[in-house]
Image: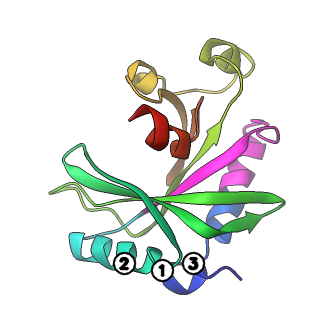
Amino acid sequence: MHPIDNLLESPSPFLDRLFAALEKAEADVSNYELDHLCYRVESRERYEEVKAGLSTLGKLLSEKEIGGRPIATFKLNEPILYQGRRIWCLEVPAPKPGSPYPEGYEHAEFVIHQCFPDFIGQHPELDFDTKALGKRVNPEVRLQFDGFSVKFHRQSLEYVIRYLE
């Protein structure tokens, strides 16, 4: 059991659903680092509570205003272990004003090694959302599933925070 299980819900059921969806879609992510998870909260008050709790489990790497609300990123002192993977970072966005979200894990992000056209070309059967390819910092492509998404980047979130922001 990871200490995060006492603060938030265990990420294992979310990761089980995520990997089952990727397997059904025949999207092989076995060679990619699972960079971080995103945990959504319903209110600004809950955001502050989760942020305070996470500060006891890791180090705040960044808290930036993005899209009209703060987003905190923590590097955990102890990684979340899941099927041989080590997940070191957790992202927690505050809800945008007027756009509440149900609390829980919302997406996971992988770091890919090839350029986006090659990566997308390896999976022609998948319907990638490419709207964020034009982002100035850390562009991405995304797969949307029922209730969550999976994003693919070329750089880890920790690298982006340390060197590109």
**Residues in magenta?**
18-39
Q: Mark 3 highlights which residue? A: 4
Q: Is residue 20 magenta?
A: yes
In the rendered image, which quarter is residue 119 located in? top right
Residue beneath label 1, please?
56
Residue at image point 57% right, 32% down: 153
- Decide which of tag 2 and tag 3 comes sooner along the chain: 3
- Of the pair 23 and 106, the residue shown nearer to us: 106
In three-dimensional space, the C-alpha distance between marks 2 and 3, rounded to whole angstroms, equals 12 Å
Check disc 3 and give the amino acid type.
Ile
Name the residue located 55 percent from the left edge and 87 percent from the top edge.
Answer: 6
Residue 124 visible here:
no
Q: Nearer the viewer, residue 29 or 62?
A: 62
Q: Is residue 47 above or below residue 115?
A: below
Question: What's the residue type where badge 1 is placed?
Answer: Thr
Disc 2 target residue: 52
Q: Secondary structure at mark 3?
A: helix
Earlier residue among tags 1 and 3: 3
- Neighbours of disc 2 within 10 Å: few (<14), some (14-19), many (20+): few
Q: Position of residue 110 (x, y in %)?
A: 64, 41
Q: Determine crowd level at label 3: few under 14, some 14-19, many 20+ residues with C-alpha closer than 10 A.
A: some
Which quadrant of the rendered structure holds the C terminus? Answer: top left
Image coordinates of residue 159 in percent, x first then y, are 54, 40
Position of residue 123 relative to residue 55, above or below, is: above
Residue 31 among magenta residues: yes
**Above/below status of 118 relative to 31:** above
Q: Secondary structure at mark 2?
A: helix
Residue 121: percent from left, percent from top? 70, 14
Q: Residue at x 72, y 44 (%)?
A: 33
Q: Is there CB contact under 8 Å for labels 2 and 1?
A: yes
